[in-house]
Amino acid sequence: MPRWRCSHPALVEDDGTWVLYFYTVDLMNFPADGVIGRATAPGPNGPWVPDAEPVLRPGSAREWDSRSVIAPHVIKTEDGYRMYYSGTDGMGGSQIGMATSSDGIQWTKYNDPATTEVKYQESDPVLLLGEKDSWESDQVHQPRVFSNGEGWVMIYRGSNKNKANMGLGIASSDDGIHWSKSALNPRLLPTEIKGAYQFWFHNALLVDDTFFVFIEGDINQRTQIYLATREGRMP
């Protein structure tokens, strides 16, 4: 069965162990089924040993993340770990969820007990789709989240149903749970790369006071990696 694996930035534990979170996608189905796994190694060159079971799985049949959980970004905190991830339902639309863990292995998805909709019974997304016909009406996903000492910043990709509108957006939060999207979104569009029609994947780093965003730009169904930077706060 064809499967696609994609890794994300590794963490280095206090004892020197390297920890990598990754996701696998079953390409035989649409929307694709996806789970998040974890692997460890004594150093960046391995040998990498994956855990026997995924660390995060999709929700039940009617949940907002019933089809896949993918694109994790894991952050170490004073209490343990936070994972931000993309959750997809049976219709293909995706939103961004969060899970917490004390050991990086057993994870609990964020759940707001005040929500009553059927699709939010087990857990809740922390970043929702945009309004109908907006640039992010079908997908908000690929979260990259940073704590800068004054709060939290998220860089994410959004798109509408036919991906005619696509871009990178910014959201901010005081607690990493309740997010406000920037009024200036989308902050970066594929058209800012000459000849590009879409963004595929992106990743980001915060070094000192500068954000470095690496973007996979699609030009005639071939991709290259581009870099965008921004110094200072993300309004």
Image (cartoon, rainbow, N blue to C red):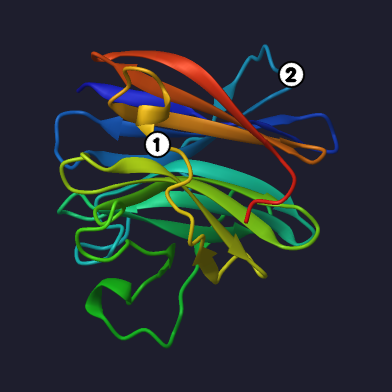
Q: Which of 59 and 6 is in front in this view?
A: 6
State whether residue 198 is above or below residue 101. Answer: above
State whether residue 115 is above or below residue 136. Answer: below
Of callouts 1 and 2, the N-terminal one:
2
Residue type highlighted by circle 1: Leu
Residue type highlighted by circle 2: Gly
The residue at 81%/58% (across/down) is 149
Query: Are discs 1 and 2 less than 8 Å apart at CB?
Result: no
57 lies left or right of 137 = right
User: In x, y percent, where is residue 152?
Assistant: 66, 59
User: In x, y percent, where is residue 160?
Assistant: 23, 49
Q: Is mark 2 on a helix, strand or loop?
A: loop
Q: How crowded is mark 1: few (under 14 residues within 10 Å), some or many (20 or more)?
A: some
Circle 1 or circle 2, nearest the eye: 1
Q: Which of 36 and 216 is in front in this view?
A: 216
The alpha-carbon separation of the residues under discs 1 and 2 comes to: 37 Å
88 lies left or right of 216 = left
Residue highlighted by disc 2: 43
Residue highlighted by disc 1: 189
Residue 1 found in image quarter: top left
